[in-house]
Amino acid sequence: MLQWPKSNDALGTTNRGNPAESGLCTLCRADCTGKCETWLSSLRGRDLIYPRDFGSITAGSEHTVSVGVCYSALRIQGYCYGAHGETLKASKGDVLFTDVNLETSFGRKHKISCRYPFVTGALGSTAIAAKYWDSFACGSALSGIPIVIGENVVGIDRQAEIAGGKIKKAPELDRRIETYLRHYDGYGAILVQLNVEDARNGVAEYAIDKFGDKVAVELKWGQGAKNIGGEITVNDIGYAQFLQQRGYLLDPDPFGAASLAAAKGGQELHFARHSRLGYTNLNSYAEVREDFLNTVEKLRKLGYRNITLKTGAYGMEGLAMAIRLAAEADLDLLSVDGAGGGTGMSPWDMMEHWGVPSLQLHAKAYEYASILSARGIRPPDMSFGGGFARSSAIFKGLALGAPFVKMIIMGRAMMIPGFLGSNIEGVLKPDNRAKVNGNWSELPKSVSQFGDTPESIFAGYYALREKLGAKAVEEIPYGAIAMWTLVDKFAAGLQQFMAGCRRFNLDEIRRSDIVAGNHETAKETGLQHICAAGDEFAKAILNS
């Protein structure tokens, strides 16, 4: 098994736990005091692109050998002449990486415009999503990127009123949508995810009736973290009983004799609330197709202008079904989530051993989309997810799926600034600590070394103040400031890779801009090996 380094001396970063390929710890804590690369980037932004202590150091790469079949085994090409999608300045030979345009859009009849090709993972009924939602939603809206409200948000809300499959009141869903829309300026979107329970509860009907075309809807087939429905842990037997009465499946039965006896005896209880598996009553592609197309048609009749689909790390048949049906239904986006990430609660053994890893799944998604395109069938716009937390990986994902991939999904990476900023706000504004769910009573040295004010701690503070105004920025959650700072760093890094490949617009990125660092990866992805790419042209130059 590949082991990723826990520290990077050049950047001055260290992982608290065991790092994954993304650079994130396998277990990311909301109270973490630092300082992995994503954590520190949420404070220092673009500074983390470069080695530390300029003027007193030299630095060299430690990652030039590509092993295994994974995104780290891909290498990004660079070119010494030309410009594609260049601006007027570029055509005069006067260009910087900052001239790269990262604005993009996705969709069919009603396109969604985004400032950057990033979208959050689905943030649903896990407690951590609810606690830090203000930071996530505000940060996403200010950055001009879409955010996804995950499954079961209405169903688990004690204050929601549901009767006969019709929602009378859904305060938590309202809060999440309204928080994003408060800062929305035309870039990005808010998507409400639907699973089996959400469909039964009438979430789609409620959202469109109350918010109209300000919201989009995402149908859910699965995710990369697990091949069963969404889960949360419940420790309160009363709440577990409430959820079961609302129609959820609870394990163990909170009304069972054993659970009642354990509660009476004072034993600490743990209930897992599960979502139902979809399509369990269907047994063929034809049946799935009919049901799916009918569902999409119903959503369109409700008034939804934008409909998307998220599928998980299923095998090749499931992937092909998702691509073909998304194309046939004219969906606006198909999200393809590789094994084995996650943002909340998934069985650990399942995350480790089920499903198709991201690189292989994404490579096949490109292949299958190409088959449709060759037949004259327009494939859906796609987004790739599953372990993205660096600009290099973002570029690789966009190139691997080009021209079909428009967006990169980042789940856990986009949550880290929300945690970190909230912890800092809880210290600097003690009266806000409970409100923002801050976990610290004082700033750790990893933060205080930069100062003790938001202006000194967050490298992106003044740029955001310029955007919003001095008074407005003071009302923004610190977690949103951290998220804005991190997104800016991702964007700058992506611009640099694109400029090196001479691609000054996202739609100019080509699959040939990445190569395989080893022959096994070349075979699995269909990419050229690093020494084969351009070799024919090189020899033509030498023999001319």
Image (cartoon, helix red, strand yellow):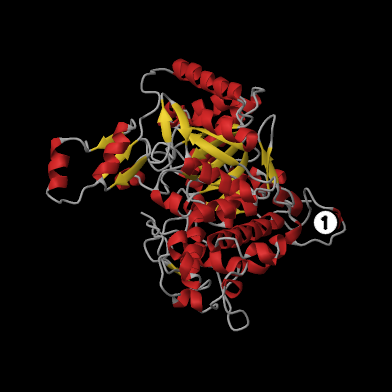
Can residue 314 be seen here? The reply is no
As drawn, the residue found furthest toward the bottom would be 56
- Answer with left or right where residue 21 lies relative to residue 450: left
The secondary structure type at the circle numbered 1 is helix
Q: Nearer the viewer, residue 245 or 374?
A: 245
Can residue 189 be seen here? The reply is yes
What is the x, y in percent for residue 319?
A: 49, 31
Q: In this rendering, is residue 454 above or below 489?
A: below
Res. 333 image quadrant = top right
Q: In this rendering, is residue 312 above or below 544?
A: above
- Answer with left or right where residue 3 lies relative to residue 66: left
What is the x, y in percent for residue 70?
A: 47, 49
Q: Nearer the viewer, residue 209 or 222?
A: 209
Q: List the residue tagged with mark 1.
A: 90
What is the x, y in percent for residue 113?
A: 69, 42
Residue found 59% across the figure and 48% down from its top = 180
What is the x, y in percent for residue 454?
A: 57, 71
Q: Which of 331 and 195 is in front in this view?
A: 195
Q: Which of 335 and 122 is in front in this view?
A: 122
